[in-house]
Amino acid sequence: MRTKICGITSYEDAMTAIEAGADALGFVFYEPSPRYISPKEARAIIKRLPPFVEKVALFVNSDAQVINSYCQEAGATLAQIHFEAPDELYEQLFVPYIKVVRAKEPSDILKFSDEYRLVDAYCESYGGSGKRLNIEWFKGVECSKIILAGGLDAQNVSSLKEYGFYGVDVSSGVELSYGKKDTLKVKEFIKNAKK
Ligand SMILES: O=C(O)c1ccccc1N[C@@H]1O[C@H](COP(=O)(O)O)[C@@H](O)[C@H]1O
């Protein structure tokens, strides 16, 4: 499975994840998050990173103009739209994007099923909460376009192989403290996801 390590706030953590084999890094452009980073700070990290690693900009309740300008300023290669956005917003984006489904019930995981999408557990407050989805919901579902998120860690990621997810995304499960990654947990997570 491809892996995304989200909530990067330093060059050191970014390089730890890349050297461990991460396919994508996430930068949270949502001010209430304890993992918030400004586009300027993200740019300072991103411009030093090697090619062929996806740099993902995460947004909650932002408009298209903000998403376009933050991605351009930071040098992000993909926007993660972590809220229910109207179709018009997607039509106005100049950057590639991925939609997020915040699943409350089993049928939610089938939304946008013809598209690559990220499926996270629904939570009143937005994201990075460590809340898990019921993995039973994915039994018998075509998962090859789903990036699974929500409460993943180095241990439980090992049990996902049979589902055939396109990828996995983790934030709190590999942290030492908010916005600071735990090197060992990052390495274990990526190793187990790719086994
Ligand atoms: O990481 C955050 O702070 C965050 C803030 C707002 C929306 C989403 C956020 N993170 C994303 O949440 C999921 C699950 O995270 P966790 O592994 O359960 O902590 C993941 O997609 C993060 O990218």
Image (cartoon, rainbow, N blue to C red):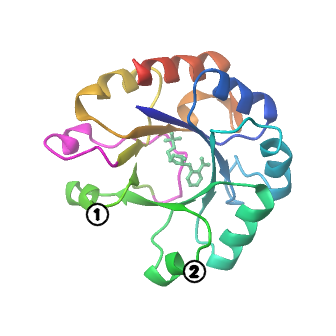
Q: Return the mark for residue 168.
A: none
Left/right of residue 113 with respect to residue 27 in the rendered view: left
Tag 2, which secondary structure? loop
Instruction: Give percent across and percent down for residue 51.
Output: 69, 39
Left/right of residue 46 with respect to residue 156 in the rendered view: right
Using a 10 Å C-alpha cutoff, classify the residue at mark 2 as few (fewer than 14 neighbours), some (14 to 19) or many (20 or more). Answer: few
Q: Residue at x 38, y 24 (%)?
A: 156
Instruction: Give percent across and percent down for residue 107.
Output: 20, 59
Q: Which residues are magenta?
A: 124-145
Residue 121 makes an appearance in the image = no
Q: In 3D space, how far apart are the residues under numbered discs 2 and 1 (Cα atoms)?
A: 21 Å
In the image, residue 129 lies in the stretch drawn in magenta: yes
In the image, which is nearer the foreground, mark 2 or mark 1? 2
Q: Residue 4 falls in which quadrant of the image? A: top right
Q: Residue at x 63, y 39 (%)?
A: 53
Going from N to C along the chain, the mark reached first, 2 or 1, is 2
Residue at which label 2 appears: 92
